[in-house]
Image (spheres, grey):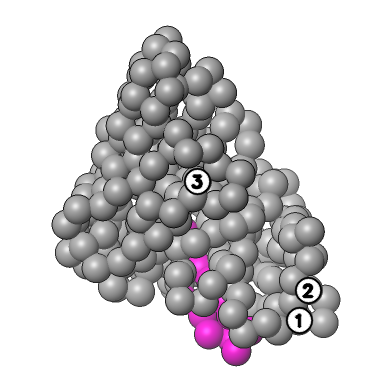
Amino acid sequence: QSVLTQPPSASGTPGQRVTISCSGSSSNIGSNYVYWYQQLPGTAPKLLIYRNNQRPSGVPDRFSGSKSGTSASLAISGLRSEDEANYYCAAWDDSLSALFGTGTKVTVL
Amino acid sequence: QVTLKESGPVLVKPTETLTLTCTVSGFSLSNARLGVSWIRQPPGKALEWLAHIFSNDEKSYSTSLKSRLTISKDTSKSQVVLTMTNMDPVDTATYYCARIPARQWLVWFDPWGQGTLVTVSS
């Protein structure tokens, strides 16, 4: 089963901007919306970004999403210690299956 | 307030069938706009989508696990049930259920249940 590819790790110091990439194909990211989930240590995932770049209420505007072609990105600006978590992208695939990314662990140095 | 809670066995033996229940509150499984998905996560690994179901009984399954999965619902009990046959140690994972709040956006999972850890071992 195909997956969406993310870098395994990303890091930054407090206040910095961190960007996470998510690479797919024409059958998933290329033709469907991208979603991002944040998973804090020991907890269930939480919706962070929906439909490429929309933030649910309560999600700080430090988090932003974008999509171009068959890739997507999540940016965290003004990095804070509480942002240390695993981040997953997700998209529907036209083979009638939902796909998650491989996950990126963000570390605040 | 919308909540989902997973329940089921903590330990299953290889070759056995796993049955998990997701009990929802704060919304109705008869609502045509809403659905429920099952997603799992092996320890230290990434999330993996398993299946979803909607009020009209429309279902979809992971292509790689389709032969082993069955999803169903009991609207009167506000429960969604997932069965997985022929369990193997590689199926050891935390199993989550999550609401799909908009039928046309099938990867929009919000909120999630707390998850239940299932270990497969003899």
Q: Residues within 10 Å of mark 1 (few under 14, many from 20)?
A: some
- Tag 1 residue: B75
Q: Position of residue B97 (x, y in %)?
A: 63, 59
- Tag 3 residue: A48
Q: Position of residue B55 (x, y in %)?
A: 63, 84
Q: Is residue B72 above or below residue B87?
A: below
Q: Is residue B35 above or below residue B7?
A: below
> Which chain does the numbered disc 1 sit on?
B
Residue plotted at (30% across, 66% down): A32
The kind of residue tagged 1 is Thr
Seen as rendered, the residue at the extreme right is: B77
Q: Marks 1/2: CA distance? A: 5 Å
The kind of residue tagged 2 is Ser
Q: Marks 3/1: CA distance? A: 29 Å
Residue plotted at (66% across, 48% down): B115
Q: Classify mark 1: helix, strand or loop.
A: helix
Q: Position of residue A40 (x, y in %)?
A: 57, 32
Marks 3/1 same chain: no
Q: Nearer the viewer, residue B43 or B46?
A: B46
* Residues shaded magenta: B49-60
Residue B78: mark in rendering: 2
Q: Marks 2/3: CA distance? A: 26 Å
Residue A44 magenta: no
The kind of residue tagged 3 is Leu
Q: Position of residue A70 (x, y in %)?
A: 19, 56
Chief SS of the magenta region: strand
